[in-house]
Image: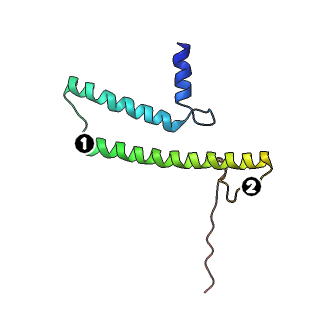
Amino acid sequence: MSKLLDFLHASFTDATRRPDGKLLTIAAVAVIVVATYPVGWVFQRWPPEYIFSPTLLFLAAGLGIDAYVTHTAIKARADVEQAQATGQPVPPDPAPAADVQVTTTINEAAK
């Protein structure tokens, strides 16, 4: 049982070893997709394709974009930390930390 728990912990954590919501969402969707077929065969009720397919596609696109953004932020922070540790110049435009909020203000030019 310990090996199973270790596998699940390693499978559903991100590069910083924290639980990753994206991976847990993908696992939940995979369970739903796999469970759809036996349930459909038993009860002869299937989700309509015009609902089921676009939902999965939008979810996959959103998770893919979010995974790319997370990967880029982690890589940028790692590059900055490595540069600081080795005494090299810090790379320009490092990614902000995940808990930083950015506020943008737009000033209109006077007419």
Give residue 100's position: percent from left, percent from top. Answer: 67, 51
Q: Residues within 10 Å of mark 1 (few under 14, many from 20)?
A: few
Residue type of the residue flagged with mark 1 = Glu
Q: Nearer the viewer, residue 32 or 109?
A: 32
> Above or below — where is 14 with respect to 88?
above
Specify the label residue 49 is tagged with: 1
- Judge left or right: residue 58 versus residue 80: left
Furthest residue toward top:
1
Give residue 77's position: percent from left, percent from top. Answer: 67, 47
- Judge left or right: residue 38 versus residue 29: left
Residue at image point 29% right, 30% down: 36
Quarter of the image for residue 41 reads top left
- Please state the total of marks drawn on the protein image: 2
Residue type of the residue flagged with mark 2 = Val
Quarter of the image for residue 92 reads bottom right
Please, which colouring scheme is shown? rainbow
Specify the label residue 90 is tagged with: 2
Furthest residue toward right:
87
Residue at image point 62% right, 81% down: 109
Furthest residue toward bottom:
111
Give residue 22's position: percent from left, percent from top. Answer: 50, 38
Q: Residues within 10 Å of mark 2 (few under 14, many from 20)?
A: few
Residue at image point 57% right, 45% down: 71
- Judge left or right: residue 83 versus residue 69: right
Q: Secondary structure at mark 2?
A: loop
Distance from disc 2 to disc 1, alpha carbons, whole Å, reads 50 Å
> Above or below — where is 11 with respect to 90?
above
Q: Secondary structure at mark 1?
A: helix
User: Which of the two labelled residues, at mark 2 and mark 1, occupies the earlier sequence position?
Assistant: 1
**From the viewer's perspective, is the residue at label 2 or at label 1 nearer?**
2
